[in-house]
Amino acid sequence: MKNKVILSGKSEEFNPKHIFECGQCFRFEKENDGSYTIIAKNRVLNVLKKGDEIHFNNTTDEEFSDIWEDYFDLKTDYSKIKETLSKKDDYMKNAVAFGNGIRILKQDLWETIVSFIISANNNIPRIQGIIERLCEKFGKPLEYNGKTYFSFPDAEKIQGDLSFLRAGYRDSYIKDACGKVLSGEVDLNNIRTLSTEEARKNLLKICGIGPKVCDCILLFGLSKCEVFPVDVWVRRSVSALYETEEDPRQFANNKFCDLAGYAQQYLFYYMRETNSK
DNA sequence: GCGCAGGGGGTCG
DNA sequence: CGACCCCCTGCG
């Protein structure tokens, strides 16, 4: 029987709201009590911040150390990352303060590939809907708290006509990803051993993966934390705030070095949240 | 309320 | 460089 795990003294480095709403993942639900229920790793987990404690419901000590510690990347010390980035400039300092408690998740690579293919030229509510329909149809049912959730399906499960997803032209991209992963043309078992550049080259073989989607996959699915995905928001903030014509990726790699991925996440979240309100 | 543009975490040809 | 599926949102 699953129970709960409580983590204390980590609240400065772990804020569920910021972690799930900063744009890196799509399969989360905010509950009435302020907690977040997420589906990942073929499991359902509920995360509640309660004062200085983080409550992880529906897991065990063993599962927590086997699965969730890695997923939440709990071994990484964010205080150093935040300190280093905050010293870069005032804007980054504000972005870091705003997104305090963000962590870059180590998400399932295949799920990240499909999710970010779906994300291209799309908006978040619709992206989430498409992913949910995909999981309902092809995933495995998971019971939690009287509700049925669905795991993210493996490539071999995704087949047939995908028009029910209402993903539009992305159907064929999803199919292409399934085909190339199943055939081994893009070998996900081996890709973790490759350098960032080699991994990028491989991922770009899939139709529907361009530079931006690829960088999101590298950052969120392969933990390539020096990668700086440039979307419309980040491009705007870099050119406006830093008043540079330089390619944002070059700029970020020079300025933030191996922390560019973290910097991107703080910038993206700060930009989005402060611009839409 | 409802109908209609506008545009969306880019990518492809 | 223009078109792109299909919504989701906001304005009239």
Image (cartoon, coloured by chain):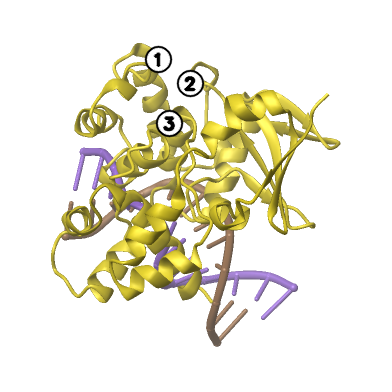
Chain colours: A yellow, B purple, C brown
Which callout, 3 or 1, points to the residue nearer the camera? 1
Q: Earlier in the sequence, mark 3 or mark 2?
A: 2
Residues under numbered marks 1 and 2 in contact, where contact means CB atoms less than 8 Å apart: yes
Q: Earlier in the sequence, mark 3 or mark 1?
A: 3
Which callout, 3 or 2, points to the residue nearer the camera? 2
**Mark 2 residue type:** Ala
Question: SS at mark 3?
Answer: helix
The answer to which of A6 and A41 lies nearer the viewer is A6
**Mark 3 residue type:** Ile
A162 over C4 or under it: above or below: above
* Quadrant in the picture for residue A62: top right
Image location (x, y in percent) of residue A87: 31, 67
Disc 2 marks which residue?
A155
How far apart are the two marked residues, 3 and 1, measured between alpha carbons?
Answer: 12 Å
The chain letter under disc 1 is: A
**Mark 1 residue type:** Leu
Disc 3 marks which residue?
A174
Point 36% across, 44% down: residue: A216
**B6 displayed left or right of A68:** left
Point 25% across, 27% down: residue: A202
Q: Are marks 3 and 2 on the same chain?
A: yes
The chain letter under disc 2 is: A
Disc 1 marks which residue?
A182
Question: SS at mark 2?
Answer: helix
Q: Badge 1: few (under 14), some or many (20 or more) residues near its Cα, within 10 Å? A: some
The answer to which of A119 and A199 lies nearer the viewer is A199
* Quadrant of the snapshot with the N terminus of chain A: top right
Q: Are marks 1 and 2 on the same chain?
A: yes
The answer to which of A213 and A90 lies nearer the viewer is A90
How far apart are the two marked residues, 1 and 2, measured between alpha carbons?
Answer: 7 Å
Image location (x, y in percent) of residue A74: 52, 40
